[in-house]
Image (cartoon, rainbow, N blue to C red):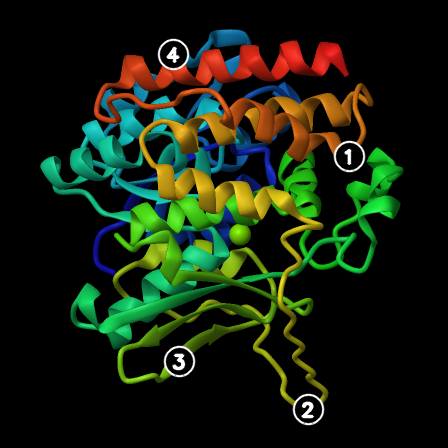
Amino acid sequence: MSKKKRIAVLGATGSIGKSSLDIISRTKENFEVILLSAKSSKSRLEEFSKQFPRAVCVLTERDGINKLLPLIKELKPDITINGIAGAAGLKPSLAAIESGSDLALANKETIVMAGQIVIRLAKENNVKIIPVDSEHSAIFHLMRAYSQTNDAISGIFLTASGGPFRDFSFQEMENVTVKEALCHPTWNMGAKITIDSASMANKGLEIIEACHLFNINPDKIKVVIHPQSIIHSMIRLRNGVIYAQMSKPDMRHPIHDALYWPVTESSGLEPLDFDSLTLDFYKPDIQKFPMLKYAWHAAEKGELYPCAYNAANEEAAAAFLEEKIKFTDIPRITEHVLQADWHGDVFNLDIILKADTDARFKANSFIKSI
Ligand code: MG
């Protein structure tokens, strides 16, 4: 790389942010961090700003998201890593694209809530959206390597670890504690996404995300339980051949690939060793994990249904973390919210944001009645 890539890291103190800064620190000669944002954790952000003295640092909880958005537009990063958790990540993604910055996207909600707007805006601004979610990163790179056109793809296999309750019965899941749900077998992530992994809402969001990112129908997306999280996802071409992407489960891989895209560079990360490797695959039980079923439903219905799914789940997961509801109430709340009418214009951001607010209101009314 001849010129340093100028990078913004949003959500710098979260797990994606920390892994990103680790990758950047390994090869500082290639990158310059120009903007760092975090929701809270002032002391951590101050540490980072010492490490990256040329970066502007924003604390969104104190300064507000409205301070961050114009900074993105003013600084015009070459690439923006969006590792913000939840719906709060949408506006920063839009600001990055509008500034002409490529977007290394770990924030699923950006695509789930406003996929059509985001993809159109990216085309208009000639910027690339490079997925950082391990599954979508795998598919993105596999498609680039093996399929010339979208028509060549006959299916996508999203792998899922199955989370800590893979072998629990639905009855057993009724009584799980927050602590149990926060113990993820393979990935070390933030609280919300860990709860989503346990309920498989995370995989549900990924189904919706994949439909938008790869312009593929929901019925072509399969979920495969793969507890070891070695295969990050697979594509199947029309000739029946399946290609898989494999590595140790380490989020630094997809982050590295996004930061260096379109170049393949040495990562220095530990390679996969086949000497004692076992790979297992199971079919997911959608009766036990209804969040998968509702995600396919929301993806099929389109319009504002995915936004409603996301909002309902976000409120339900938060209520579970606050011990206001049972774990198995998360899908009940989501199902209840999805029963409302979520037709509407997906190209109108105000309508999307209103659907998000309405869905949260419905979810919370239902939570109060439980
Ligand atoms: Mg993922």
Is 353 or 193 nearer to us in this picture? 353
- How busy is the neighbourhood of tag 1: few (under 14 within 10 Å), some, or many (20 plus)? many
Q: In the structure shown, which secondary structural element does the residue marked by tag 2 occupy? A: loop
Q: Of label 2 and label 3, which has the lower sequence position?
A: 3
Which quadrant of the structure image shows residue 155?
bottom left
**Dots 4, 2 in contact, CB < 8 A:** no
Residue at mark 2 to residue at mark 3: CA–CA distance: 23 Å
Tell me the amino acid under the disc marked 2.
Asp
Q: Which numbered circle lies on residue 354?
A: 4
Circle 1: element type: loop
Q: CA distance from mark 1 to mark 2?
A: 38 Å
Q: Earlier in the sequence, mark 4 or mark 2?
A: 2
Of 190 and 255, which appears nearest the observer?
A: 190
Cα distance in 3D space between marks 4 and 1: 27 Å
Residue at 36% across, 27% down: 304
How many residues crowd mark 3 within 10 Å: few (<14), some (14–19), many (20+)? Answer: some
Q: Amino acid at mark 4?
A: Lys
